[in-house]
Image (cartoon, grey):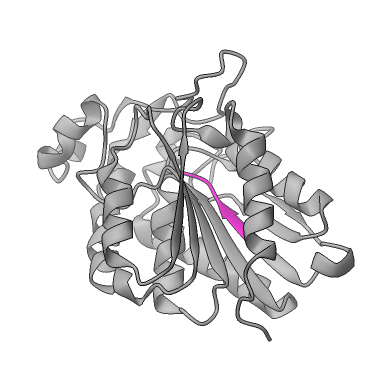
Amino acid sequence: MDQVKPGCEPFEAEGSGPHARTGVVLVHGYTGSPDSTRPWAQYLNDRGYTVNAVRLPGHGTSWQDANTRTYADLQAAVDDAVAGMRARTDRVFLMAQSFGSTLSLRVAADHPQEVAGLVLVNPWVRADGLAGWQRHLVPFQRFLPYVVKSVPGVASDIADPAGAEMGYERAPLVGAASLPKGWAQLRPILHHVVAPILLYRSVVDHVVAPCNAELIRATVRSPIQEVELHRSYHVATLDYDAQSIFAGSADFMQGQAGPQG
């Protein structure tokens, strides 16, 4: 495994006060790192919540490292993080950026009574859900890794010129070739998701298309509150609307009874 870059480490912290027994697992996007979820996690921890901003395997290191990891590795990391959080808190919320939404929704579908709620920011949950030029590669994704190992990445789609994401400059095609398996496994069970959802969607997103949110709305059995973001692009947790997302997610948790014990 390659060395984790400074600033890309996972962030885990115990809560305090009345919210200490509420746990939050935060999941970054594909080719991203906890750099995009740590400010969110820190905000919630400052308000007493127990948090774990997970670092997905092969992320925060190098795109070559990501090419050695599969969808199953990523899902296992999130499954383990949620199981660990369940062991030490009374209820667990999942909060995710982009492809992290696929991993989080899978947990909520597999264990519907163990997830108190989800906050999804610009979710990517379908193979044909890209908005940029990369969508033209989808028909060839099974064969491309035999020809080329990476293509230009999609990191730092941020409206704020002062914002930056510590994501990969190259997208790892070998690792990405396994992602459709995750979507194929999720779609038939997506209707098992019953946990309330707060969904943030940027009106201008150069990475994922609106069809991702449409699939979630049409398939889950959850009550969904959708909030449009008019000032931020894809990595909204590092953009102009970040503080609004953080505060909204805290309000959302306080409004949910959630599964206990």
Residue nearest the observer in this picture, 230 or 147: 230
Residue 170 visible in the shown view: yes
> Looking at this rendering, what residue extends furthest in the right direction?
17
Q: Position of residue 257 (x, y in %)?
A: 64, 76
Q: Residue at x 23, y 71 (%)?
A: 188
Left or right: where does residue 181 sit relative to residue 117?
A: left
Q: Can you tell which quarter of the image residue 141 is in?
A: top left
- The part of the chain drawn in magenta is 25-29
> Looking at this rendering, what residue extends furthest in the bottom direction?
261
Q: Is residue 244 above or below residue 68?
A: above
Q: Residue at x 55, y 79 (%)?
A: 114
Q: Can you tell which quarter of the image residue 187 is in?
A: bottom left
Left or right: where does residue 76 sit relative to residue 24?
A: left
Left or right: where does residue 260 sit relative to residue 188?
A: right
Q: Is residue 202 above or below residue 249?
A: above
Q: Position of residue 112 (x, y in %)?
A: 46, 79
Magenta stretch: residue 101 in it? no
Residue nearest the observer in this picture, 204 or 207: 204
Residue nearest the observer in this picture, 42 or 17: 17
Q: Residue at x 22, y 48 (%)?
A: 127
Residue nearest the observer in this picture, 234 or 222: 222
Magenta stretch: residue 28 in it? yes
Residue 178 visible in the shown view: no
Q: Residue at x 59, y 31 (%)?
A: 238
For the stretch drawn in magenta, the main secondary structure is strand
Which image quarter holds the C terminus?
Answer: bottom right
